[in-house]
Image (spheres, grey):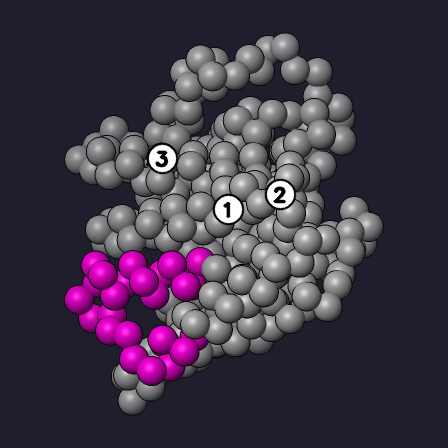
Amino acid sequence: MHKASLKDFFLLITLAAIWGSAFFNIKIASDTYTPMTLAFGRIFFAALVMVLYCWMKGIKIEAFGEHWKMYALIGIVNLILPFFFISFGIVKVQSNMAAILMSTAPIFATILGQLFIQDEKINFLKLLGIVIGFLGIVYLFSDDLLINQTNFLYALIIILGPFFYTLGGLFSLKLKHIKNETVTSSILIWAVIIFLPIIFILDNPTELRPSWTSTVSLFYLGVVATAIAWLMRFYILKKNGLVFQSQVAYIIPIFGLIFGYIFLQEKITYKIIVALIAVLISTYLIEKSKKAKSS
């Protein structure tokens, strides 16, 4: 495996900062956009940028080729559902806490990997990581200042986001032999095609009167936090491997906390810090268990 350079670490931290900044931008955009319109707008701008990028680079897009059914399925599971759940849930949940809830993805990855991937076996370190992560989330939920009867359901909805992200990643393994840019653009195209009629049936985006601030945040979410971030992610993944790229999950909540505090004046209480530490320990142990297995 390629030894990570200083540039690789810089890209990893930059990717974490971009994804960490997504939470407070969703919060801003949701002021005048409905959750469904917000989710669609993010996917639409990302698809537009990816199509233009592939066209400029001469990269083939295979949205309607042999694997179109898988592209469509991943578009639903890995984009439409997570984006909607996150956009809907964050209306009543602090963006810094949402960042921590999203960092539970490695926990779901371990569980789904054990169930569906032949080489993934739960050992002591992995089990310990899952338990610590779960206890951290339970501890976070016990604080009425952060989770109460009003927003408890919204917090659970946010957790569905990383679950479906992980499930979509599991499906994506079937397309690992195809160029990353091709897979990304094809998935985004199908997500737009599927989502477009749904948004007009269940929502009425033409009646919205969005502010410029919300629109800028929406554009940022699509172009930067989705299209550019996905390209960076695939670059890191191809050059340094899955384990190195997965470390981004350790850093995202930290930036979520920082951006939520700076831009939204959200609270940073000791329970958020404790839960964050638990999630970081959890993901670290899960990744360490993979190295222990290979040694």
Please give the residue where the numbered disc 1 appears in the rendered image: 156
Query: Residues in magenta?
Result: 105-129
Crowding at dot 2, Cα within 10 Å, few <14 / some 14-19 / many 20+, comes out as few
Which quadrant of the figure has residue 251? bottom right
x and y, in percent, of residue 217 in the image: 68, 36
Of labels 2 and 3, earlier in sequence is 3
Image quarter for residue 262? bottom right
- Badge 1: few (under 14), some or many (20 or more) residues near its Cα, within 10 Å? some
In the rendered image of this protein, does residue 269 appear above or below residue 40?
below
Q: Which mark is residue 149?
A: 2
Question: Which numbered disc, 1 or 2, marks the residue that appears first in the sequence?
Answer: 2
Q: Nearer the viewer, residue 286 or 244?
A: 286
Vertically, is 216 above or below 24? above
In this rendered view, identify the residue nearer to me: 171 or 185. 171
Can you give x and y, in whole percent of width and height, for residue 234 in the image?
Answer: 42, 56
Q: Is residue 125 magenta?
A: yes
Q: Tell me what residue is drawn at x 46 percent, y 37 percent.
A: 50
Q: Is residue 169 above or below residue 213?
A: below
